[in-house]
Structure formats: C-alpha cells, structure tokens
Amino acid sequence: MTELFGYLLSGLVTGAVFAVMASGLTLSYSATGVFNFAHGAIGFLGALVFFELNVGVGWPAWAAGAVAVAVFSPALGYVLHRAMFRGLARAGETAQIVGTIGLTIALPALGLLLVDLVAEPLGLPRADATSLPHGLGPYPAETFTFGGIRLDSDQLITFAFAALAAAGLWAFMRLTPYGLRMRASVDRRRLATLRGIDADACSAVAWVLSSTLAGLAGVLAVATLGLDSTAFTVLLFVSATAAVFGRLRSIPWTFAAGLALGVVQNLVAGYADFAEDITGLRTAVPVILLFAGLVLLNRSKERVAGSVAEDSPPPDHLAGLPSWRRRLPWALALAVLLLWTLTRPADDFYVGVVAQGLVLALIFCSFVVVTGIGGMVNLAQASFAAMAALTCGWAFSSGWPFALAIGLGVLGATAVGVLVALPALRLGRRVLTLATLALALLADQVLFQVDAFSNGTIGWPLPAIGFGFADTTDPRVRVVLLLALIGLVGLLVRNLERSASGRAILAVRSAPAAATTSGISAPRTKIMLFALASATAGLGGVLYATSKGSVTATDLPAFAGFVWLAVVVLQGVRRIGGAVLGGLIAAIFPELLAGWDVSAHVGAILFGTGGMILARHPDGVLAQLAELRHRRRLRRARVVVGGTRPEPRTTAPARDGGQGLRDAALAGSPVAGNGGPEIRDVAPARGLFRLEGVVAGYGEVAVLRGVDLVVRPGEVVALLGVNGAGKSTTCAVAAGDVPVTAGGVFLDGTDLTTWPAHRRARAGVLLAPEGRGVFPGLTVEENLRTWLADPDPVYQRLPQLARRRGLAAGVLSGGEQQLLTLAPALIRPPLVLIADEPSLGLAPLVAEQIFEVFAELRERGVALLLVEEKATSVLELADTVAFMRLGRVTWTGPRADVDAERLTAAYLGVS
Amino acid sequence: MRRLICLAAAVALATTGCAAERAAGGGDAVAGVTATTIKIAGILTKTSASGYSTKDAEIGARARFERANATGGVNGRTIEFAGAEDDNQDAAKGDAAAKKLVQRDKVFALVPVHAPNFGGAVFLERTRVPWFGWATGPQWCGTTTGFGYNGCLAPAPGAGSQTWWGHQMAALLGGARGRTVYVQTSDSSGSKYGGKTISQSFQAAGFEVVGLNSGLPGAAPPPDWLPYVNKIMTSNGGKPPDVLVSIIAGTKFNTGLYSALKKAGYRGVLTDATSYDAAILRDPATAQALEGVIAAPMFEPFESDAPEIAQLRADVEKTAPGTTLTQHLAIGYWAADIFLKILQQTGKDVTREKFLAIANGGFSYANPGFGRITYPKDHTEPNGCGALVKLEGGVFKVARNMKCFDNVPLK
C-alpha cells in the first residue's frame, strides 16, 4: 500500500512538470490558434540559460533560475511573437505546423552554437550529453521522508512552483484586465479588435506567458532530463497529450491531465510487467493516450476559436501563360540534369547526391498529394516509407521474388495509409495532424521495435534493382529511373486535379460543408488521397532502402518526416515542382554546408529561419517566384499606362488643415432641428466622421470604388442599398477592419486611414458588426468590462442584463445580445457608432427598443451610421440618407427628400 | 528578402555544379595511395541532437598516425590523415559521408569510424573499402571490410558472445558463487539485446541473474526513479542483489539510477560500461553519486602502468597537449594502431584487395592496450577482452587489467 501511495505521490511531482509545460501549450494554442511544436525547444533554451548561469558562471541556482524563467523566457517569447508567430497566426495550418517544427530544430541549434562560440573565451562549460545541470534546490538534493515515502528537495520545489504557476495563471486570466482582453480575443478575435482590444498585443502576452511556462518547465526538468534537446521534445509530446485532454482549451483540465499523466507513467513502470515482451509499449503509453484522447475527445465540429487562418490556394499568377511556357523552365532544367548525369562516371559522388535528392523528391511527392491537394497535414509520412521498406526487406529475406517484395511493401504502406485515414474522417484538421504525429511515434516506438518485422537492430539487406543492361548500384541509372517515376506521379497528380474526383477533392478542401451538401463524398476522397500518398511514400521508401543497400528500423525516424514536410512546404507543397526542388535541396544543401566547413548547427538554424520566411509567405518559394514575376509585369504595365491609377491620399493632408474646422462649422445646420443646445454640452461639435474617395476590396477584387460619406455629431445617417452594394464593406473600412487602397478615413480632420481597428475603437469609432457583437464565451459582466471599467450603470439602465450578469453571453436571447452589444455605448458613448444591420433577426418589439437606444445616442451627440436592408424602420430615425450601388454612394440627401420613387429607384438600380 | 532566397537556392545548385567540376579528373591506379602517402579519413558522430559525441576519436587516431609518420611512415609512405566527417548520428548522413570520402576525396580507407548509427556499411562493403573503428552495431558484423578494433560487439545468435565482464567481476569480488546480479536496460531493442549478452556473460562466470528489467524509457531519463528502484531492491527474494549492471547509455541515466538506489539503501556493487569518463570527476556531486562504481572499459585503462599506455599518453600529449583522455580517444587510437599493423604487413605494393586479403587471411595481433584481435574471426564476434576500473575517493583506479576470456555462443 505504501508502494502504491509512493507511486501516486511521486507521480504527481513528475506530472507537475508535464502540467506546467502543457498549460503553456494550451494557453498559446487557445489564444492564437498556433500549436507550438517548438514549446519543448523553448523549454530547452530556458534550461540551457539556467545551466550556463548556474554551473558555468557560478550564480546561485535561485538567481540563475529567476533570470532564465522571468527574464530570458518571456523575452524569447516576445521576440518569437514579433519575428514569427504573429505572421503564422494568419498563415494557414500547414505553414503553422512547419514554421514551429522549423523552430524545434533551429532554437536548440542556435543555443548550442552560441554556447559553442562563447564557451572558449568565457570559460563556460559546453552543453552536451555529458554536462550535468543542477536543480533549483540545494545540490546535491536533500531527501525528506513523509510516512515512508522519500521525496527530495528538487521534487518538492518542482511541485511548489507548479502549484504557484497554476494559481498565478488562474488569477491572471480571471482577475486582471489583461486576462479579460486575452480571453475576449480568444473568444472572437475580430470583435475584440473592434472593441479597442489590441489582439496583436494579446497574442504577444500569450506568447510571453506561454514561453515563461515553457522556461519554468525546462528549468524544473533539466536536473533529471539533462541538457538533451531530444528529451525536451519527448517532454513536449507527453505534454501535448495533457493538452489534448484539456481539449486544447481549458487550462485547468490540461493541468489536471498533466498531473494524472505523471501518475499513470509511474503506475505503468511499477505494475505493467506484463507488457515487457512488447518492446517500447510502456514507453509509448503517453502516445497511446494521445491518440485515444484525440479520437475520443476532439471530434471537433468547428474550428478552434482564434484560428483565423484559411488554407485557400494562392492566386495562380502564371495562369495567363501558355502551357509550353509554364513548362519551359522545368523542361530546360530536366534536359540539363540528364545531360550532366549521363556525362559523369559511374562512381561519381555528385550524381549519387542528386540521385539521393530525387529519392527524397519521390517521397516528397506524397506530401503534394495529401497536403498540397488534400489540405491534410500528415506527419507520419516517414513512417509509411519505413514501413514499406521494412516490409519489402522482410518479404525479400523470406524468399519472395524482389519485384513481388517491392509490390508488397508498397501495398503494405497503402493499407496503413487507409487505416490512418479512417480516424481522419471524423477528426478536424489540426486534430488529424496530431493523430498522425501520434501514429508516427507509435510506429517508431512499438511497431518498428518488433524484431520479427525489423530484424532487430540489424535490419534487412536489399539488392539493387536490375534492368538487364544496368542496375541501380549505378547512380546514373537511379537518376533516370527516379525522374521517370516522379514524372509518372506528376502525371497522376495532374490527372487527379483535372478529373471529377480531383475537383471533388479540391471542393472538400476549400469548403467541406458545401461539398457535402453537393453530394461529394468527403470520406471516400480523403481515403483515396491517403492511399495514393502512402503508396508514393512507400515506393520512395523502398527505393531509398535499395539505394542504401539495406534498411533498419532507425533509418527513417518519425522526426525525419517532420523535417521533410518542412522542406517541401518551404518550396511549395501544391506542385510536384516544389517536391523535386525540396528533395534536391535536402540532399545537396548539407553537402554544401559540410564543404564550407561550418558548424552543423548553422544548417539547422538556416532551416529554422525558413520557418520565419514561411510566416510571411505561406505558399513557399515557387509561388513566391511566380508572384514576383507577376508584380514585375504589373509594374511594367503601369509604367506603360502612365500612372492613371489614383494615388492614395497624397493630397489629403494638404486639404486637411482647414477643412476639419469648416466642416465643424457646417455641422450645426442639419443637426440643429434635432439636437438643440444639449448636444453641444455633451459632445461639442466633435465627432465629425468622413470617408473620402474610399477604394477598397478583398485581394484584387475592388468592392468600394470611391465612397464619399460624411456623418456629423448628433446625426443619424442611414446607408441603404441592395445586397452586395458594399454597405458592410463600408462599415468594415470605416472601423478599420478592411484596409483601403485609395482614399481616406477622417475623424475631426485626423487621418485614421492607416490606423488599425483597435486604435480607431479607442479613438471613439465603434462598430457593432453584423450579427451579434458579443463574446459568447464570456459572461455578461465580462462582456461589459471589455468597454467599461465599471458596468454598474448598465445594470441600473437595463435591469434585465443585471439579472444575467453571471451567465455566458452566448446563452442570451438575440435581443438581449443586441442590447448587450449596444449597452456599453449608452454609458460611455463613442464619438461615432457604426451599426451593421442592427435589427437583423430581431422581433419587431425588440428592434424598436434598439432604435430607441440609437435615438438616445443621437440626443447625446453621437454620430451614427446605420446600415439596414429594411429601409422603413431606419428611415423613421434617419436625418440623412445615403444610397449605395455598385460600390459608390449614388445619392445623399435629407430624409425629407426621400420618397417612394427615389427609394424604388435606389433598390431597383434605376438612377 | 524574397529575391535573396531565390538567389540562394540558385547559387546552391550552381555551386554544386562547380564543385562537381573541381572533383572531376584523377582516377589513379589505387585510390588514395601515392608513392609517398596514403590518404585516410574517418567518420564520427561529432555532434548530435542528443549531445552524444565521439569526436575525441579523431585526436586518438591523429596521435597514432603522427607517431607512425614521425618514425618514417609505413613502408616508406606517410599517412595523410584528413580528419573525420560528422554524421550527426544520422544513418543517411553517415552513408553520404562515406560516399563523399571514397568517391570524391578518394581516401584509401576509413579510420576511425565511430558512430553508433553508422549508415555507410553497405556502400563500403560493396566498394571493398576497409573501415576501422568501434563495431557497436550489427552493420559491422559479418562484413569483410568493417574491422572493429575489439571485434564485432553485436554478434548474431549462435556466434560468440563475451564473458569477460562476468569473469573479471568474479575475479574482483573473489568468486561468483552464490552472488546475484540484476541487469537494468532501457526499453529499446538495442538495449534489450545488450541486456541479453551481458546477462549471459555474468551467467557464464557463475553469477545468478535474478532480474533483467528493460522498463526504462529509452529516449529520456524517467523523471521519477521510484518504480525501478523498488523492483531492484526486492529482486533477490525481497532483498537487493549483490551486483547491479546498468546497460543504459548516458551519465544522466546512471547518476539518476545510482543516486536513487543509494538513497534507498543499496550497498551492493554498481557496474556499467560508460562511467569511465573523466568529465564525471569534474562535477563533485556526480562523482559522489558514482562513487564506488565499477566501470568496464574495453581497453587498458589510462591509469595502467603498461608501457603501451605510457606511449599512448605521450603520443596524445605530443599531438594535442593537455587533452583529457577519454574512451572515444582510446578507440580512435587503437583502431588506427590495428590499421597500421595491417598496412605494414601488406607490404610496399598497396591495393585494397591485397590489404583485405592480408587482413582477412588469418591476421592476428596482440597488444596489452586492447587485448588481441584475429580476423576474420572477430568480424563476427567480440575479441572477448576487457578491464575494470573503480571510482574510489573521486579518482579512477585500475581494478582489473585488460584480460581476454573465451566467448560462449549467444543464445
């Protein structure tokens, strides 16, 4: 019994490290939508700093720990946010995964390189497997006994810090305004910016906090783990399990799951002797739990909050070119490559390198299928390749003919691919990625450890593929064979994209729901993609093994698959060309680096910087080349036309000087009838809001083609028009949600055009967006606090909200939600309130109440811009009416001038 | 920035082309051999993600080669040692490095090869290029070109397996009769294999093996040693065993396990293959945790008073003054020593075929530094020699000098 209790207690201590690590992971994921694979690497760097300060420089452990956790780690988090995560949050899931995987490799390398550089002059110890970091407590640790259970000082300190971190995190999130802002931007990022919350700053806070937690976990764990970055990656995977059990959302649950994992590991180590015969099974317990957790808990129907990223394909800038011109560079490169290859001797080293690059390219083609076309990120691709190679080796050694053995290997990989695809059908995309990660680790740790399958550490020998006149021991033969195979896969991919099933796949990728309603079978296409991709990877794996001459279980480790994905995505994962380029670079680049005699760390760091580039250009090098060419053409075209395009805002500042005042003087006249003297008491002639020649749109599609609009203080301007006229875009432009390409937005003569949404909100331009402007996950009280320091006056005004102050806003009725949206404005009126379809979906009585609020705000001098499709109700309130059509304001005038005829004309598009 | 990336990619490709041009030409009768020199290079795991490094082997080999050159070379030729490539503990990189050294740099042989996950074996065997080093992995065994300085350490079932560890330990403790042994490995097939051979070694010497546990996670030390320590402390019918053998790589693992065991009251013998490491002594707490441990190096300890070891120390001091002597350094040194011996016997007309014929034609060489070696026998089994070193009062002391014992067939 003491034994069991001992396992439980010391398991909790172990779990405390997992818990700290995992809560950082959950925090950053829920706040920014980026699952940070580099979380363990950040912990490693924190531990490295701690070690060098403590053991190297000789600082006391507490001081070194404080610097590593409270100074270094937050700073690192902030730098990474600025350099990378900020861009990644909008870059699409593939780029996010690849970017952070790049960091996992680059960060430890950077740290170790720096230590290598400064170790000699400063007399610091080098950080490697032999270095012996201390814990935070006394060294060597002291032991305490509690009722027969021994715990040492390091364990006690670990537990205490974990408890402190948990309490601190809870207090920060629940009790501080920063926490509230962060939760608000997690809940609805866009709305948060419209409320004046700087979502970017919130992300920064999240990364700083998450990085601090990683650093803390690193410092706590380093005494037992040692300075081994792989061990920290393993720690990350265990923590990911805890995060998944917290559903990647709930920090308390994550924390509890982390503690529980520690206990489970201890119990397995203590009692699961029956698992001894299956090598690796006990090590793999966290991974098995990860997989189970993903399948059972995360059948998410919706995208996780905060993931603003969309994976839409980049515009095809080369679409206008004839097909021969598109293929010309590739054909030329192919001809040069073949010519060069065939003139080299048979034992030429560089032909061998190119052949190796092409083997990788063939494997990389599988990423084009599953990720480029299917939009699913598969981290288990190296395992498929290894599986095929091992199966082939096993079959050949058991006496099968070689050709059949190859076939069996490829079939085996295909079958496993289908098996992987089955859970994929039910999982969301990020969850699928994690599931493939779990499978890859499981294959490494359990399946490939089965001696009968992998022949122990010896592996299987594989012969060369012979063609009678030549065989694949000659690298030139390999180059030709591989080029042919890649060409074949290229053809397959092209046919796939053009065929009915290919279009179905693309449909599933860009809009799963729409595809389903159109009768396209998403599951079938997903399975097909996985099968095709794993067959390709399997073939590549077999060729990889034959060119090496043998295959062992450790030749193609799971982590190689992560690196491969990164290499392909860096080049461009949507085209076979990206795979080929990626394969060649992966094989040639290390050779070059070795030739230049630079530290191996440099290669890893360069690779990681690739991730940062990806944050800015998520579609890879090839797409970037095409875009560059496109822009160059555009520029040239513009020069030819002679600059007819309107230059944005060059004249605006010049006009600004006096006009603000003049407008303010003018402002009196139309308002006078409504407002009376008290307007000037509350908002004395401030709040004149003006759009001037605004041109804006999405991408290269212009929606607004020169909108001019003026809203004066105490005036209600109703913006009317048919669907698609540009009303909502006008609102979005006014609030700073959509950038303008020409023209300007002014408040009291101040040019707001370049201001981000949250800054405009703080300056007094508030947008109540279409739908409901509430944070459904926050309580009523918290919703109000995002705009008001003290929500009590709201409760006095609107007692129905007071009764529900503790409820989540998402459970309120539509009318209550709209009241909640507008209520803060009643207490702290903005200068300008823009409401996009405020009465949409509300019962007439409730809508009336909403319009009463608007009337009151007008009384108090707020400039109101109301967008409505239903003209009648808003016309009762409006002072001025503006009609929009095809991105322009076609008529503006006082309400009195609006009659049925004008209204009909505006809506029917007759002018 | 974008332009830069594209440029970089283009330059990368172009440079390879240029480099290829440079390497063209050559094609002498025997690769790496001129009238006055023989070109040699090695492959080591200098850096790795886990921090494991065998880079000291380069110093060892260089020290041995420099002495050979200082005494007139071998049969009139000096050794042109081009240093060692780094394989990052990555099989593919090791393969690429072997190809580069053989095909581009035209070396005669690879010395030292000391990389736990070496991937170039098949290529070297196919191209008949000799390679010398520490044969810890099965890729060495059964080849005709891979020469482990102390034989093949991963024999296949049925081939000979070492018994020296058990016998040396029995001699040290004054007999094995009635003494119990517990073997701790980690949860990977490589480590389990090690556990099997070493259990057999202790059984052959007369010990009773009361436990063979492979529960430790392979990738990283467990944060909590309690379950493992509990098992050990009760393995001998509720009591702790007399000897604990640890087959886990890494000081962090061993210090963790030993400290936990000592705290739990373990008073028996601790022994492992990796603790003979001067770096341990630098850290007082680790030295304290490992105090009393008996390490089992597969070469004559540096503290020995054998003249061959004095020579080794002198050679290293001349090549790289102030170098700390390590296990990897000794491996590089002895691998080079054996290579030179075979080269000398090959005679003036050196070809790879002749070299291999001499080496595999009943070559036998005894040296107190590493025991004895006989090829082709030791292509498939270990040479069966080892020493014991005890960490006592913070310094290593020779407990048993290098001695060879007969192998027994691996079950």
Image (cartoon, coloured by chain):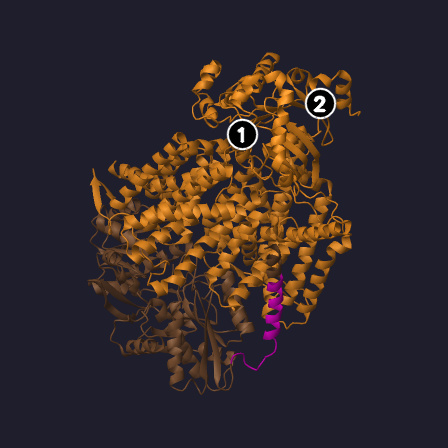
Chain colours: A orange, B brown
Q: Position of residue A749 (x, y in %)?
A: 59, 34
Question: What is the three-letter code of the residue carrying label 1?
Answer: Gly
Residue drawn at the location 51% of the way across and 51% of the way down: A102
Q: Which residues are magenta?
A: B10-32
First in sequence, mark 1 or 2: give its number: 1
Q: Position of residue B185 (x, y in %)?
A: 35, 53
Secondary structure of the residue carrying numbered label 2: strand
Residue drawn at the location 38% of the way across and 84% of the way down: B70
Q: Position of residue A198 (x, y in %)?
A: 50, 36
Residue drawn at the location 39% of the way across and 34% of the way down: A172
Q: Is residue B270 left or right of residue A492?
A: left
Q: Which residue is mark 2?
A: A893
Question: Which numbered circle lies on residue A764?
Answer: 1
Residue drawn at the location 23% of the way across and 57% of the way down: B288
Q: Position of residue A889 (x, y in %)?
A: 71, 29
Q: Is residue A380 left or right of residue B62?
A: right
Q: Residue furthest right?
A: A910
Q: Say above or below: A886 vs A563.
A: above
Question: What is the three-letter code of the residue carrying label 2?
Answer: Gly
Secondary structure of the residue carrying numbered label 1: loop
Q: Viewer-proximal residue, A598 or A552? A: A598
Tags 1 and 2 touching, CB below 8 Å: no
Q: Say above or below: A305 vs A389.
A: above
Q: Is residue B268 left or right of residue A827?
A: left
Q: Is residue B20 magenta?
A: yes
Disc 1/disc 2 C-alpha distance (Å): 25 Å
Q: Say above or below: A362 vs A782.
A: below
Q: Viewer-proximal residue, A126 or A225? A: A126
- Labels 1 and 2 share a subunit: yes
Chain identifier of the residue bearing label 2 in the image: A
Magenta stretch: helix, strand or loop mostly:
helix
Chain identifier of the residue bearing label 1 in the image: A
